[in-house]
Image (cartoon, rainbow, N blue to C red):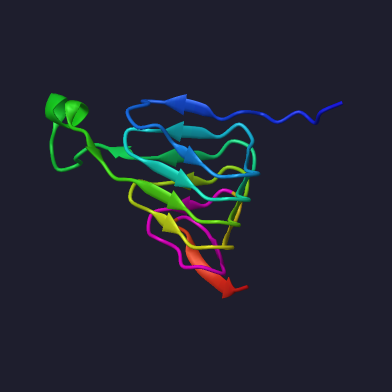
Amino acid sequence: MEPYQPTPRFFNVNKTPKIGESCSLVDTLLDCNDQIIIGDYVSFGHGCKVLTGLHDYTLKGEARQVSNKTEPVIISDGVWIASGVIICPGVTIGENSVIGAGSVVTHSIPANVLAAGVPAKIIKTI
């Protein structure tokens, strides 16, 4: 019997995501307003979100609601994204890095580090 492999959920599919080989996207939401690139051997825990769209916070009312900026997200080979992580627009996560459970990644993360927190910060090199 083949193992069950949950598929990601897609939202705002304006760009088709590029997903590498042997990736596990357990209950992951991909908000594809802009390009999402996921490398090979990337693992997502439960309930993660990858976001590429944002609103202009400097506007008010309807103008803020209908504003829509987008920025791509790149997740490099061998990355592990633990459960409940939110990855914000414009972020790149370097090869083999690990993002701790419940983190909010607001800035790019270099390769080979453990990052965690809200906002995510580098904890140590791995």
Q: Look at the image and give the residue range highlighted in magenta.
A: 102-118
From the viewer's perspective, is 74 left or right of 26?
Answer: left
Residue 93, placed above or below residue 88: below
Name the image quarter holding residue 50.
top left
Q: In x, y percent, where is residue 74?
A: 42, 51
In this rendering, the count of numbered labels is 0
Return the residue nearer the eye: 113 or 86. 113
- Residue beneath the point at 52% across and 52% down: 103
- Residue beneath the point at 56% across and 34% down: 28
Q: In x, y percent, where is residue 14?
A: 32, 28
Magenta span contains residue 113: yes
Q: In x, y percent, where is residue 41?
A: 63, 51
* Residue at the farthest front position: 21
Return the residue nearer the eye: 46 or 102. 46
Magenta span contains residue 99: no
* Residue at the farthest right position: 1
In the rendered image, the quadrant that contains the N terminus is top right
- Residue beneath the point at 81% across and 28% down: 2
Return the residue nearer the eye: 83 or 1. 1
Return the residue nearer the eye: 44 or 58. 44
In the rendered image, the quadrant that contains the C terminus is bottom right
Name the image quarter holding residue 3.
top right
* Residue at the farthest bottom position: 125
Q: In x, y percent, where is residue 124?
A: 58, 74
Residue 28, placed above or below residue 113: above
**SS majority, magenta:** loop
